Image: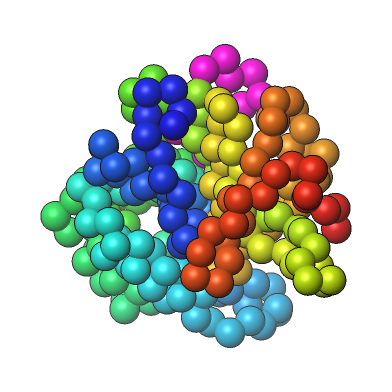
Amino acid sequence: MLGRLAIVPDLSGALWLPEERTLVIADLHLEKGSAYAARGIFLPPYDSATTLATLTAAILRHAPARVIALGDSFHDRGAEGRISSDDLRSLHLLQKGRDWLWVTGNHDPAISRAMGGETATYLNIAGVVLRHEPDAAEAGFEIAGHFHPAAKIRMRGRALRRRSFAFSARRCILPAMGAYAGGLNLRDPAFRPLFREELTAHMLGDGRLFRIDRQLLLAD
């Protein structure tokens, strides 16, 4: 729970709000691969399709009436012009029959109507603010993305690093869903002002989520 809002982390990296029938996602970074290719850094050009497949599976599990994407859904301003017709068709099919809200981020401060859905800079649901970049000065409850949290732990004698939700009593930061988005270690100083109270990680594992207390988290 965040305040009065029930929240359920999903293995995909999405956050399910059952009472609102809302699926919250963050940092898809669609077309990151093509952005790198334009700079001469060639990666397999399938990141958008892979990311949309992950999102499709989450939507099929929960059948949300509404999807909220918390910013950096597109890797840059040119992503909309590079996305393939097949991937754009897949995106529009996911939007069909449900409300879709793009919260703008630092990578995608403007999103065209051609991508479907509506846009906003933030949203408030049951007293919880949903925005792209978490605000350390937020006095209430908050759900955000931006930082791509990742947890590193030691398990069976070896280090394991995976994308992770970051939770406290007042805040949830979602992991990036984008296939090429990467992650920032939860021990990084960037998280300190955001989690002055207790931090709990929910790490994405193979087939399940693992709840990890702060003291078990390792630095890179």
**Where residue 157 appears, x then y in whole percent?**
84, 71
Q: Is residue 48 visible?
A: no
* Identity of the residue drawn at 37% across and 23% down: 4
Tell me, yes or no, whether the highlighted magenta stretch contains residue 55: no
Vertical relation: 203 (above or below) 2 = below
* Identity of the residue drawn at 42% across and 76% down: 49
* Identity of the residue drawn at 50% across and 23% down: 141
- Residue 183's quadrant in the figure? bottom right
- Residue 57's quadrant in the figure? bottom left
Quarter of the rendering occupied by the N terminus: top left
| Camera-side residue of 46 and 153 | 153
Quarter of the rendering occupied by the C terminus: bottom right
Vertical relation: 59 (above or below) 217 = below
Q: Is residue 183 visible?
A: yes
Q: Which residues are magenta?
A: 130-140
* Identity of the residue drawn at 33% across and 67% down: 56
What secondary structure is the stretch in magenta mostly built from? loop
**Where residue 184 appears, x then y in whole percent?**
72, 53
